[in-house]
Image: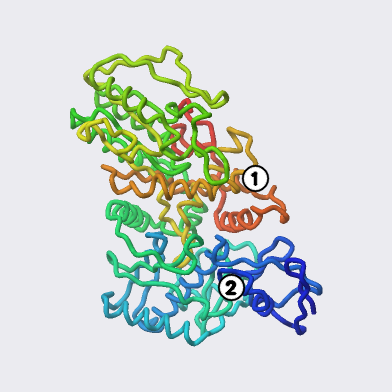
Amino acid sequence: MKIIHKGTTYELPEGSTYEDAAALVQNEYSERIVLARVDGYIRELQKVVEYDPCPLEFVTLGVRSGSEAYRRSVSFLAYKACYDVIGLEKMDQFFIDFSVNNGYYVRLAGDFVLDQALLDRIEARMREIVKADLPILKHCVPVRKARKIFLEQKLYDKERLLRYRRTSAVNLYSIDGLQDYFYGYLVPRTSYLTCFELTLHGDGFVLGMPTSATPNEVQPFKSNPKLFEKQITTSDWLNEMNLSTVGQLNDLICAGGFEDLMLVQEAIMEKYIGDIAEKIAADPEKKIVMIAGPSSSGKTTFSHRLSIQLRAHAKVPHPIAVDNYFKDREHTPKDENGNYDFECLEAVDVELFNDHMTRLLAGETVELPTFNFYTGKPEYKGNTLHLGENDVLVIEGIHCLNDRLSYALPKENKFKIYISALTEMNIDEHNRIATSDVRLLRRLVRDARTRGNYARDTLRMWPSVRRGEEKHIFPYQETADVIFNSAVVYELAILKQYAEPLLYDIEPKEPTFDEAQRLLKFLDYFQGVDSINVPINSLLREFIGGGGFKI
C-alpha cells in the first residue's frame, strides 16, 4: 500500500498503521509526531491506514491538537500509576480538578495519606510504565457495558455522563487492562510519554506537562496562591452543590432544577460583587478601580454591576476604558508579521492617560478622549469629568494590573481586580473543561452576534489572543487585590445552542476544522437549555445578548 506525504509517495506493507507511516517521515519534523490527518480529519496513530493511496499529514507536539493528545495520555498514565500503587480498594477517587501552571491539579480521595513518599512511588510507577512501552489500546464497547466497567472502577461521574450518551456504543482506552474514557485523542504507546513532573501542592499534586509552545520540557512549577485559592473555593462550592461534573448538571436539568440554579448562581455572583464594592467603599483613599482580565472574561458587564454596587454604597462611579487612550493608528506598533499590535502596552498613550488621571485626582476638570476605531484616531466630544468627594474611577483594560500603565498614580489610590472565567466544572473525573475553551465559546457567540464574524475567523485569531494574554495579563494576576471568577455554572448548557450552528459551518478543508470538531464533541455532552429565563443582568448576557446594560 502507498501513502503520499508532502508530494512524496512511500510504500508500506498491507495492514500498516499511521504510526508505521509516521516513522518514515519523523526526521522531517522537529517535534514528535503524535497524530495523523486524512482528508482534514484527525486519525490516531494506532489506526490502520484506511485506503490506498492515502494522502497524509501529521500532527506533532508543537500543535495544540497534538499537545492535548499528549496531555490526555499523561493523565491516563497518572491514573494508571495511582491505581497500581494505591489500589482500587483504597483509592476512592482520582480527580483532575483544574489547570495550574500549564499542568493539572489532581486530588485523590481514599484510605491513605498523600505525602511526598507516596507521590514519589506514583511517579516512579509512571516512569516504569513509560519504559515498558505498553500499547494504549482503543476499543468500542456498548454504553451499557462501559457504564458497568466504570461503576466497578468507582468512576461514578463517568458512569453518570454516559447515561446521556445518544449512541449505543462508546470508545474506551486501556493500559494493561485498566480502562478509561476521554473526549479526545490519545497517543498510541506509553513510551511517547517521557516528559512530565509531579509536585505536591495543597491537598493534592500538580501533574506538570509540556505545552505546544514548549513541547519538549515542563516549565518549572510556580505557585500562584491568590488564583489557587479562588480555584479551590469555586471547586469546593461546586462539590457541595453536586455540580462538579457535566453529568451532575445534566441530572439537575432533567430534574427541572435549572431555573433555581440560575437564580442561586446570580445571587452568589451578586454577593461577591457587593463584597468587592464594600471593600472599595470602606477605604476613602481608593479612588481608582483597575479591572483587567483575558478576552471574554466579562469585564464590561462586571464593571457595570460593580458600579451599581458602588452606588449602593454612596459612591459615584465613572467608567473609563483604556482603549480610548490608544495612540493614533500610524503610531501603533506592529508585530513580527507586520500587523498592528493593539495588545501591547506601547499601543496606549500611557503619558496622556497618566496626565488625565493625575489631574482628575488633583481636582481638575478633564476632557476625556473617545477613540474612533474606524479612523484610528482619538476624538474629543465634550466628555468632561470632575471628581467629587465620593467619586470613583472604574478603569477597564488588559494592562490595568501592570503598574507601567498607571506609573504616576499613587498605589494607595488604586484597587486592582483580576477577572477571569475560572471554570471548575469538569466533564468527568479525568476530563476537565479548559477555562480558555469557555472564553472561546463566549467570544464565538458574541463576535457572530455583534460583529458578524464567522466562527472560522474567531478560531483563527484565538491563538494570537492567547499569546497576548500570556504576555500582558497572566503575569500580573497575583498583584490584584481581589480575583473575581466570572464563570457561570450553567453557561455551557446555554451557549451550546448558539455555538453549535456556527461551528458546523466550518468545512474539513479549513485550517480551523480540527478545533471546531473538538468543540462540537465537547458541547455534545451537555443537555441544552433555552436562554429565555437568563436574568437580564447576568454576565452571560454580554455574549448571548438581551442584557439590561448598554454594551
Measured in 3D between alpha carbons, the distance from the residue under mark 1 to the one under mark 2, in whole angstroms, is 33 Å
Residue closest to the far top: 382
Residue that carries the numbered disc 2 in the rendered image: 144
Give coordinates of residue 524: x percent, y percent: 59, 56
Q: Amino acid at mark 2?
A: Arg
Question: Tag 2 or tag 1, which sits nearer the N-term?
Answer: 2
Q: Quadrant of residue 511?
A: bottom right
Give coordinates of residue 191: x percent, y percent: 51, 81
Residue toward you, 434 or 538 = 434
Residue that carries the numbered disc 1 in the rendered image: 502
How crowded pointer 2 is (Cα within 10 Å; few <14, some 14-19, many 20+) is rated as some
* Residue 547 vertical position relative to residue 424 in the rendered view, above or below: above
Give coordinates of residue 427: x percent, y percent: 49, 60
Residue closest to the far bottom: 132
* Residue 357 vertical position relative to residue 159 in the rendered view, above or below: above
Depth check, mark 1 against mark 2: the one in front is 1
Q: Which mark, by number, is residue 513?
A: none
Say if mark 1 contacts mark 2, CB within 8 Å.
no
- What secondary structure is marked by label 2? helix
* Residue 106 vertical position relative to residue 119 in the rendered view, above or below: above
Q: Amino acid at mark 1?
A: Leu
Circle count: 2
How crowded pointer 1 is (Cα within 10 Å; few <14, some 14-19, many 20+) is rated as some
- What secondary structure is marked by label 1? helix
Q: Is residue 234 left or right of residue 255?
A: left
Please name the colour scheme applied to the rendered image.
Answer: rainbow
Give coordinates of residue 95: x percent, y percent: 40, 67
Residue toward you, 551 or 293 = 293
Q: Residue at x 37, y 79 (%)?
A: 123
Q: Quadrant for the N terminus, please.
A: bottom right
